Image (cartoon, rainbow, N blue to C red):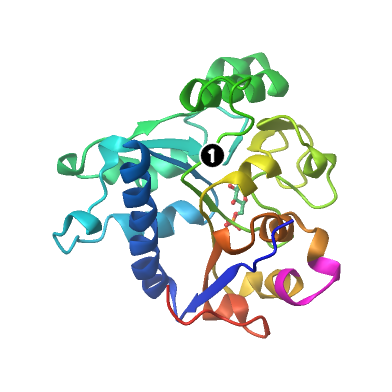
């Protein structure tokens, strides 16, 4: 349990939010490149890729600090649906359409780690999760020598029920301590079969950012930030596990009525 508190930022709209998300992500990139010459990031699906694209595809001010060095990015998925990569429900397809396909050649090409479709066709979600975990191990070193992968940044969404990644409220997966990637076979939100990073992996990341926008999120954000009952929600567990490593990027409608103090600037 972290002893520090998450940072809550709020902006008038998604344009203003994306303007601040850009320097945040690039600061994480620059720190990671200085540390190990690679930027390992995990991204979510849902509403996140469109906001991320708005942030990263904006014009640079020309300085090296404000330039995405995509050729040094390794992009993983915080969660993925067990569907083919060209299915409308695929988080990979969403990220590809919103961001990857629009990256100018001059900025380089990231290395992207989609799920292995073979296990989707086999219908075995546990094997799909195991295969994704092995892909993580190959990138982060063998699991025997590294207890948990430390992502440089994990970008999350928060569903109206408080789920994040494919970790849903009240699910046994919230107690997973060992696996890096887990299978969800009965998700309350379609499609039912998914894989997800586990909570220990999420909270071990160097930086974690949630992006939550729109009035449809205000009740759950109030619960997460202001109420005792909200403490067991998956998104709250990330807050409590990672403390001030967590930054929430919200718009004003999403935090209307939330009493938790906003941070003034990044
Ligand atoms: O199903 C999912 O939903 C969450 C939240 O999506 P949002 O549209 O409310 O932002 C998303 O973060 C996750 O990756 C996705 O699989």
Residue 82 position, x and y percent, is 63, 29
| Magenta-drawn stretch, dominant element (helix, strand or loop) | helix
Residue 88 position, x and y percent, is 52, 39
Residue range (magenta): 224-230
Above/below status of 204 relative to 214: above
Res. 38 in view: no
Q: Is residue 49 left or right of residue 215?
A: left
Q: Is mark 1 within 8 Å of ligand 1?
A: no
Residue 244 position, x and y percent, is 58, 64
Q: Residue at x 22, y 38 (%)?
A: 108
Element on which disc 1 rests:
loop
Above/below status of 254 relative to 1: below
Above/below status of 31 relative to 59: above
Is residue 94 covered in magenta? no
Check disc 1 and report the residue beneath it.
150
Q: Residue at x 55, y 52 (%)?
A: 46
Residue 159 position, x and y percent, is 66, 58
């Amino acid at each position: 349990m972290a002893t520090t508190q998450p940072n809550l930022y709020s902006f008038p709209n998604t344009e203003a939010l994306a303007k601040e998300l850009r320097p945040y992500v690039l600061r994480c990139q620059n720190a990671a490149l200085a540390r190990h010459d690679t930027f390992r990031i995990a991204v979510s699906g849902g509403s996140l890729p469109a906001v991320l694209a708005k942030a990263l595809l904006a014009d640079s001010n020309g300085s090296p600090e404000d330039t995405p060095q995509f050729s040094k990015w390794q992009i993983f998925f915080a969660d993925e649906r067990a569907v083919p990569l060209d299915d409308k429900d695929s988080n990979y397809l969403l990220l590809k359409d919103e961001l990857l396909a629009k990256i100018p050649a001059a900025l380089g090409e990231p290395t992207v780690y989609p799920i292995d479709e073979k296990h989707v066709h086999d219908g075995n979600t546990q094997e799909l999760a195991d295969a994704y975990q092995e892909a993580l191990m190959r990138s982060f070193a063998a699991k025997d020598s590294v207890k948990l992968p430390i992502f440089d940044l994990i970008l999350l969404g928060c569903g109206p029920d408080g789920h994040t990644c494919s970790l849903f409220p009240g699910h046994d997966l919230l107690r997973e301590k060992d696996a890096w990637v887990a299978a969800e076979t009965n998700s309350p939100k379609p499609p039912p079969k998914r894989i997800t990073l586990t909570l220990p992996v999420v909270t071990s990341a160097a930086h974690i950012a949630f992006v939550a926008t729109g009035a449809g999120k205000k009740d759950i954000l109030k619960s997460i930030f202001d109420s005792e009952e909200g403490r067991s929600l998956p998104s709250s567990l990330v807050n409590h596990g990672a403390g001030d490593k967590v930054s929430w990027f919200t718009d004003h409608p999403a935090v209307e009525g939330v009493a938790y103090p906003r941070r003034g600037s990044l």
